[in-house]
Image: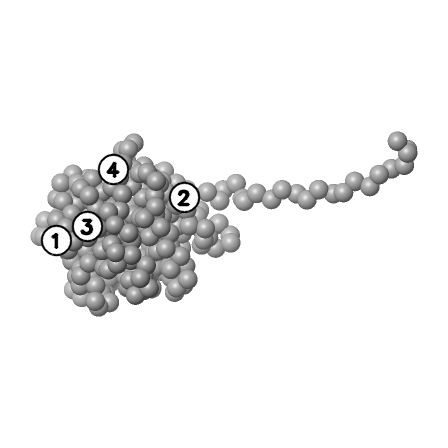
Amino acid sequence: MSGEPTAVEPRPAIVFAPEHDVPVRYMERTREYYQALGFSPYRWAHFTDAPFTPLARPLSRARVALITTAAPFQPEAGDQGPNAAYNAGAKFYTVYSAPVDRVPDLRISHVGYDRANTVPEDLGAYFPLARLHEAVAAGRIGSLTTRFHGAPTNRSHRVTMETDAPELLRRCREDGADAAVLVPS
Amino acid sequence: MSLAARHLEANGIATVIMGCARDIVEHCGVPRFVWSDFPLGNSAGRPFDRESQILTLELALRLLAGAPAARTTVASPLAWTKDPGWKQKYLDAGKLSPDEIAERRKEFDVVKAVAKAKREAS
């Protein structure tokens, strides 16, 4: 001990992310919102386990299907533009399919996307068909199925599980899909 | 969408979901999930940002090929904005006045009626 004061190196502060920067609690937010409006609470589908099928062949040889909740533009169904209010008239109620070799005109005015924070002007942000074509061209995936499929989002869980999901499966099988990329909007 | 993924997977087709609502998708329980911490509507990446869309799809493809088990979630490293303030704005009921609540309720009833008519016609 020399008795002389020693210089203490200041230690850098530990910087964490802001406390509130966590995944948005959509279920809680939606529940509170609709409760405030006087509606009874919605019950989301809930399971504690999930099925699992390993990909049957290497990705570079796999055939991939694309499934979307976006809706084909319907000229008679009101405003479906990027700034449209929630448009129930633009909904669809049965599974649809369309060829992947052209760019479809798909809109999302019929669903509850985040209108406070985003404007759906770029199809690529909610429908990755162009990026999938590039992945095929690059040899990253074997091929795409000749059609993509649209999944209705607005019925009961029962209709989804007993009607729409089996129909999507039927079409994916018909197209020889090994895998499916599902993109809700 | 989660229910459809479960059904395909249970019947031999490997699936991956690309989405933004982490709690809803994980509450349902799906085989593979790429989560982007972006406003709902941007499941496949940021608008007009090719690189972000390429990265998001690549995460999905890697999951398809390599997820070790069901319920695997990969969080995209991308942030929507540096400031997370956007997260407060989605369906913020706390900020509505009674008049606004009545107005929204009325709008929602109209939406429901339109949907019902369309559903019954289809």
Which of marks 4 and 1 precedes in the sequence? 4
Mark 4 crowd level (few <14, some 14–19, many ≥20, 10 Å Cα): many
Amino acid type of the residue tagged 3 in the rendering:
Pro
Tell whether label 3 touches label 2 (CB within 8 Å). no
Q: Nearer the viewer, residue A52 or A139?
A: A139
Could you tell which of marks 2 and 3 lies nearer the N-terminus?
Answer: 2
Give the mark nearer the N terminus: 1 vs 3.
Answer: 3
Label placed on residue A24? 2
Q: Which residue: 39% across, 50% down?
A: B36
Q: Earlier in the sequence, mark 2 or mark 4?
A: 2
Closer to the camera: disc 1 or disc 3?
A: 1
- Viewer-nearest of labels 2 and 4? 4
The residue that mark 3 highlights is: A152
- On the same chain, marks 3 and 4? The answer is yes
Q: Is residue A106 visible?
A: yes
C-alpha distance separating marks 2 and 4: 26 Å
Label disc, if present, on residue A51 of the rendered structure: 4
The 10 Å Cα crowd at callout 2, few under 14, some 14 to 19, many 20 or more, is many
Q: Nearer the viewer, residue A107 or A46?
A: A46
Q: Which residue is mark 1?
A: A174
Q: Amino acid at mark 2?
A: Val
Mark 1 vs mark 2: in front: 1
Q: On the image, which quarter does residue A130 sit in?
A: bottom left
Task: Locate residue A122, reporting x and y percent.
Answer: 33, 64
Distance from label 1 to label 3 (Cα)? 20 Å
Amino acid residing under circle 4: Pro
Categorize mark 1 by other alpha carbons within 10 Å: few (<14), some (14-19), many (20+): few
What sort of colour scheme is used for the picture? one colour
Residue B61 position, x and y percent, is 33, 52
Image position of A116 (left or right of A142):
right
* Chain containing mark 2: A
